[in-house]
Amino acid sequence: MKAFLCLLALSFSASVHAQGTPSAPSIAAKSYVLYDFQSRQSLAAHNPDERVEPASLTKLMTAYLAFSALKQNTLKRDQVVPVSQAAWKAEGSRTFIDPRTPVTVDELLHGMIVQSGNDASIALAEAIAGSEESFARLMNKEAKRLGLNDTNFVNSTGLPHPQHYSTASDLAKLAAALVRDHGEYYPLYSLKDYTYNKIKQPNRNRLLWTDPTVDGMKTGHTKNAGWCLVSSAKRGERRLVSVLLGADSSSARAAESQKLLNFGFQFFDTVRLYEKGQSVASLKVWKGATDTLNAGFTQDLYFSLPKGQAEKLKATLESQQPLVAPVAIGQRVGTMKIALDGKPLTEVPVVAIEKVELGNIFARGWDAMRLFFK
């Protein structure tokens, strides 16, 4: 019995009218990534995989794990958390929590996200994992699950350590995962200030004041890291995430991030090629109760491309053949190869969106004979 390939050519077009796409603007930063939330594509980048000190951008992972704990009911927003000496004496930016004053998880989340409080971050880490060291192990386990392959955490705050590092690319994935997986908590990142212990502190993300489409996310700064900013903006149905590392000043990180966001919205479109569960093809099945199955995707399939280029987008479905029953829902049955103007761009798994049970003995025998002579 020989294997063979089944090729189906599928073309896409959309009404996108714009001028040609220029190069990304000159950005004054050590590294950066502009990331499309829906398509999960990088639209512009410089040194995206260079390992750097992430500073307080680390707190995106601390928040991600805190939100996960809230969802799993192992943490409650009104839960009172004891303040350890380690948290109380934390260096750097602080919320000014005190061992003598009860503090809730909700207050700690506000303090960490809005004020970038290192003391709040440590208190949350200890509440979740017992110690910051144990929490760092959870951070690295989650980083691995999310595919952050060039990231390693040593603490919950981002305070400098030789083995504490990440990349612009990994931080973009983390920021997008936080919005995608914990969207109900994401509005915390849009708060412009927070008062705790009678001390009011502003959110250091200047874009919250200058661009109404920016609704988060996190700033960071140390001497070695420079001035860093992860920002996210939503205009219409599109969301972009900008990660900018190593700017020269607080104002520069905001200005350069704004340039990136404007570039992405102005010169790119994101189109939906297929909906989740939509059949993209009917594929031949051997030895099954039925002789065909519908194939598609487990999630909406989006693609980002320069404005005015949608009509040049083409996808080719390469099915795995022979496809022999039984076939389970979600089982990979092919690959969608996407090209723009004849140039390969990416490949996406295609799966069965319906199951096919094993056929009766007569159907199996007949198909076995046909495959033998194929």
Image (cartoon, rainbow, N blue to C red):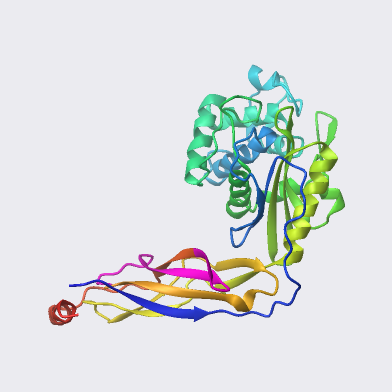
When the figure is inspected, residue 66 is found, relative to residue 350, above or below; the finding is above
State whether residue 84 appears in this view.
Answer: no
Please indicate whether residue 45 sits to the left or right of residue 74 in the image. right
In which quadrant will I find the C terminus? bottom left
Front-lying residue, 209 or 18: 18
- Of 51 and 353, nearer the camera is 51
Q: Is residue 6 left or right of residue 122?
A: left
**Is residue 261 covered in magenta?**
no
The region drawn magenta spans: 323-346
Residue 198, placed above or below residue 72: above
- Identify the residue at image location x=58%, y=67%: 302
Where does residue 244 sit, x and y in percent of width and height?
Answer: 71, 44
Residue sitting at 80 percent across and 52 percent down? 258
The residue located at (84%, 30%) in the rendering is: 199
Side of 100 where 1 appears, left or right? left
Q: Position of residue 162 (x, y in %)?
A: 59, 25
